[in-house]
Amino acid sequence: MTISTKSTHKVNFATPRSFGAAFKSKLKETLFPDDPFQQFKNETCLGKTKKAIQYFVPICEWLPNYNFRLFRYDLLAGITIASLAIPQGISYAKLANIPPIIGLYSSFIPPLIYAVFGSSKHLAVGTVAASSLLISSIIGEKVSPTQNPELYLDLVFTATFVTGLMQAAMGFL
């Protein structure tokens, strides 16, 4: 019995890609794993503009299909979440040594903004205890909230504004 050492099957190796092509492919897969711009191919300029607006402002995509049945569910969910978010926002404002009315604003402004620009149905937005305590402790070391409340509030607003800008920039990247 003899064993043949010649193989009848050959493997065809493709030529390796250049570093630039491989890097571009990996970068695209990392930043855009679902290739969101695939929908823009073979579209007119008006169609591309419409799809771009729908991609970056998701309310423009789902609002035309919104109906009263969905509104009833959203109203019930809103009442449920408000019963938690309003006292939570007030208490987090007290943790940060800022007026409670600002805590109320932090309870309902972020969900309104997220309703326009957000795309997940299962995400809660708003303040958290850790950030309230962190802001209070860091800014409280420099300025007393009882001795100079206006400067304290200005620094809190500045810190939250800069944080929001950084988060928005990371969201666009």
Image (tube, helix red, strand yellow):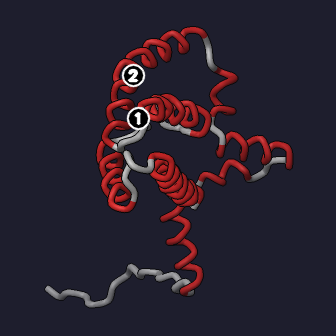
Q: Nearer the viewer, residue 3 or 168?
A: 168
Badge 1: how crowded within 10 Å, few (<14), some, or many (20+)? few
Res 151 label: none
Residue 9 placement, left or right of 114: left
Residue 129 placement, left or right of 72: left
- Check the image and name the residue furthest to the front: 147
Residue 140's place in the image compared with 119, above or below, is below
Q: Nearer the viewer, residue 64 or 41?
A: 64
Badge 2: how crowded within 10 Å, few (<14), some, or many (20+)? few
Which mark sits nearer the N-terminus, 2 or 1?
A: 2
Q: Position of residue 60 (x, y in %)?
A: 69, 33
Residue 148's place in the image compared with 4, above or below, is above
Res 81 label: 2
Residue 159's place in the image compared with 73, above or below, is below
Q: Nearer the viewer, residue 142 or 89?
A: 142
The amino acid beneath tag 2 is Ile
Q: Is residue 34 visible?
A: no
- Check the image and name the residue furthest to the right: 45
The residue where tag 1 is placed is 124
Residues at circles 2 and 1 in contact by the CB criterion of under 8 Å: yes
The amino acid beneath tag 1 is Ala
Q: Is residue 108 visible?
A: yes
Q: Quadrant of the C terminus?
A: bottom right
Q: CA distance from mark 2 to mark 1?
A: 9 Å
Q: Position of residue 22 (x, y in %)?
A: 53, 79
